[in-house]
Image: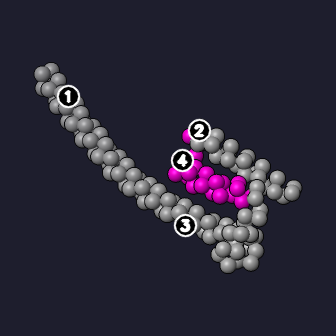
């Protein structure tokens, strides 16, 4: 009975935490929905442990605990694959942004150099005019 109570309370605390993170926009909706979906499954199974044994029996697994461990490992592997995919996409985006930034920086430097060269020519022409007029 204690384990059922602790597991149920833990699920409810996690539910409140996920909802609060979503409310504060500290967790993106797609991840929030994923964790809310997990909690919708975990909370009823934690409150009714015999239901877990019935589900395990339906799938031909001897113990409900074995089923939970297996599904937990599969779920975590899927989360890892998804996060690896997200990181790869972000790395590609970062590389593209760095290349674009380098090109823009090169353009700005070239324009700045052209302005300085034009300014130096104007200054030299003005100096030559002053010397020729004073003469």
The stretch drawn in magenta includes residue 42? yes
Asked if the residues shown at circle 2 and circle 1 are in contact, with their CB atoms under 8 angstroms apart, the answer is no
Q: Earlier in the sequence, mark 2 or mark 4?
A: 2
Q: Earlier in the sequence, mark 4 or mark 1?
A: 4
Comparing labels 4 and 1, the label whose residue is closer to the camera = 4
Residue at image location 78% in from the left, 49% down from the top: 9
Asked if the residues shown at circle 3 and circle 1 are in contact, with their CB atoms under 8 angstroms apart, the answer is no
**Residue 89 pos. (x, y %):** 45, 59
- Residue 64 visible? The answer is yes
**Residue 10 pos. (x, y %):** 76, 51
Q: Quadrant for residue 95, please give it.
A: bottom left
Is label 1 in a helix, a strand or a loop?
A: helix
Residue at image location 63% in from the left, 43% down from the top: 19
Label drawn at residue 127: 1
Comparing labels 2 and 1, the label whose residue is closer to the camera = 2
**Residue 33 pos. (x, y %):** 56, 51
Q: Which residue is mark 3?
A: 81
Task: Report, in whole angstroms, how far the alpha carbon at label 3 lies from the one at label 2.
Answer: 27 Å
Residue at image location 15% in from the left, 20% down from the top: 134
Q: Residues within 10 Å of mark 1 (few under 14, many from 20)?
A: few
Is label 3 in a helix, a strand or a loop?
A: helix
Task: Report, in whole angstroms, how far the alpha carbon at label 2 lies from the one at label 4.
Answer: 10 Å
Q: Residues within 10 Å of mark 4 (few under 14, many from 20)?
A: few
Magenta-drawn segment: 25-46
Q: Earlier in the sequence, mark 3 or mark 4?
A: 4
| Horizontal relation, residue 77 to residue 42: left or right | left
Is label 4 in a helix, a strand or a loop?
A: loop
């Amino acid at each position: 009975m204690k384990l059922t109570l602790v597991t149920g309370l833990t699920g409810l605390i996690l539910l409140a935490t996920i909802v609060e993170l979503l409310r504060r926009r500290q967790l993106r909706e797609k991840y929030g929905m994923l964790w809310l979906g997990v909690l919708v499954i975990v909370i009823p199974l934690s409150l009714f442990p015999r239901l877990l044994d019935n589900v395990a029996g339906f799938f031909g697994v001897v113990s409900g605990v074995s089923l939970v461990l297996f599904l937990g490992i599969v779920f975590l592997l899927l989360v890892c694959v998804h996060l690896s995919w997200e990181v790869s996409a972000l790395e590609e985006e970062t590389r593209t942004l760095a290349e674009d930034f380098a090109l823009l920086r090169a353009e700005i430097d070239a324009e700045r150099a052209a302005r300085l060269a034009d300014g130096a020519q104007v200054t030299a022409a003005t100096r030559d005019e002053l010397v020729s007029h004073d003469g």
